[in-house]
Amino acid sequence: MKQKQNSSGILLWLILASFCMMLAVPAFGETDEIPQRSDIEEKYKWKVEDIYPDTDAWRAAYETVDANLPRYEVFVGHLGDSPQTLLECLQFNDSLSLIVDNLWVYAYLKLDEDNRQSIYQELAGEVSGLNSRRNQAVAFFEPEILALGKEKIDSFAKAEEGLGIYAFYIENLFRTNEHVLSDKEENILALAGSISRSPNDIFNMLNDADMTYGSIIDEDGNEVELTKGRYYRITESTDRRMRRDARLTYNSAYEKLQNTLAACLGASVKRDNFYKEARGYNTCLEASLDRYNIPTSVFHNVVDAVNANLEPLHKWSGIRKRILGYDTLHTWDLNAPLVPEMTREYPYDEAISMILEGLKPLGDEYLADLKMGFNSGWVDVYETQGKGSGAYSWGTYSSHPYVLMNYSGMLDDVFTLAHEMGHALHSHYTNQNEPYVSENHSLFVAEVASTCNEAILMKYLLERTEDKKEKMYLLNYYINQIMGTFYSQIMFSEFEIAIHERIESGGALSAEYLRQVYRDIYQKYWGPELVIEENGDLGGMRISHFYSQYYVYQYATSYAAAQLISQKILDGDKEALDAYLNFLATGNSDYPVEILKKAGVDTTSPESVERTIRIFSDLVDQMEQLLNES
């Protein structure tokens, strides 16, 4: 998995969990060599040149921002002079922020084409420093607005119509007033920006550029070098010996660096705790959720609901062991195909056709825009040497969306593509509808569009099959999807809150502690049927999402919301579809809990979470029934 820090205004990198990382391209077959980027046809590459044609243009834009940073000084102490001055400063800040967004996205997209390229490592470092200087220059802004008082700002808004698009931003600013520091203190925090990203940057370099995973012997007796993509595909192999060897070998690479990884993750959590303390929050969870006015009870309610309903998971462990015919269920068996003869590859162009057909319930306009995205340089399709791992959607307000894939032709890849294109169209519609200040999405709603696509596609595939084995295959995939996007994310969230509470109470995060906590939670979720191998407790130190505090639980809340929304759409509820399409065109112009209410989901209620748990339980029962009929 991978997620990177972003500058203000950039759509967050929305990455699938590790189960979505895949192998090399099918077009090159099962070879030992991962292709170079130059081996890939242009139509399968994204068009980063649509942001800047080359690094010279990037450099010119960089210099424009750098040269204009001193202009912020003109506004210091003068925001209260007139409504027009306040508006001018807001517009000036937006103009520079948008350029920084473009600089940031270009640098990191180019870096992810090949993380070994030093030129793009340097560009990424430069824009990170530039953004820190911009944050430092604008540090006066929010404290000065707050010092003017809401009454005066409201009077400005009445006098200057142009301030209308900033109304929600200003409302939210005054809501969090007690956590905004003085001009001088905000400046210090801004200066620390580049340093605060160090744990994430170090982990990404270890994980994507420097880490090697060794080799295993394949079913034909050939030595095969492991990569992330190859590893995750082998976990779905029918060859249990290969799965075992891949799992143990892959984990060994992380075990050798466990103390470094523990120190890196520990530094990240200490950073979270530092900002919590600096801004006067009681916990890191509260600090994380308060930005979007989400009650901490929403987080705890989801975790509590899942913990109260672990029996279906334990039942599924037993059914999986029974289907596979094993005496013991190991971690390397969790992704093994339960209907091996149904396993096949899905060429990329076929995947596009499947997605377009399956998502027809979303309407003609959605399908037309989806097809346009596939044909317009949005997607970087195949794994190549040095390429960033996993999958994500990113972009800026003035660019089209970008989707990174490591497509290998598995069913998982088809769903990953549908998922990331859901993100892409969410951004596309929002950027058409909202002003720049509202273009982003909170994490709390950002996964709804992606997982709604997956839910609709899955139900399309299930409904069109009459073959019992294929149905079992799809049911197994659906079950694993809920495991990966719902239950596993809550499991990760329990780990995350444990390590943050450890630091908050004055403790430390050693490799031994991290492994034991992760093992205990892992075992609790999967139940007594699962045997966790000696080095099978390293997951907490190799998941990049933990470097963005309390990120992962929102996969679960979004997934639950998407299940509810998608069913209404498939039931032919025209109002539900219209509400959902309006949701796709909405950015940060309201609080996320309220945005989802307008889309038909009340996240303060357990309805969507409990519905997802019932769906999972029903799928497990269906699988058991089909098994009994065999």
Image (cartoon, rainbow, N blue to C red):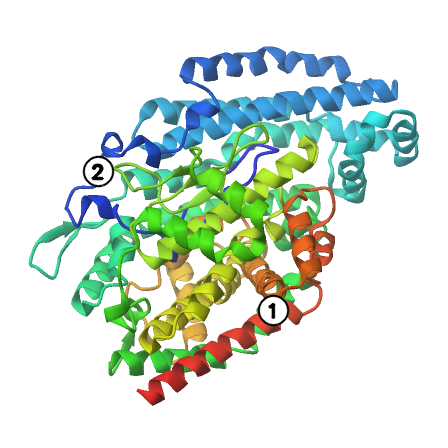
Q: In which quarter of the image is residue 17?
A: bottom left
Marks 1,2: beta carbons within 8 A: no
Q: In this view, does 204 lie above or below 464?
A: above
Where does the image place residue 120, in percent across and percent down from the top left?
A: 38, 25
Query: Which residue position is annotated with label 1?
Result: 609
Label 2 crowd bin: few (<14), some (14–19), many (20+), radius 10 Å: some
Q: In the image, which disc is placed on residue 184?
A: none
Query: Which residue position is annotated with label 2?
Result: 35
Residue 565 falls left or right of residue 259? right
| Residue 539 visible in image | yes
C-alpha gap between disc 1 and disc 2: 42 Å
* Residue lying at 63% horizontally and 47% vertically, measured from the top left: 584
Name of the residue lying farthest toward the bottom: 628
In this rendering, the count of numbered labels is 2
* Residue lying at 32% horizontally and 71% vertically, measured from the top left: 532
Where does the image place residue 259, in percent across and percent down from the top left?
A: 34, 50
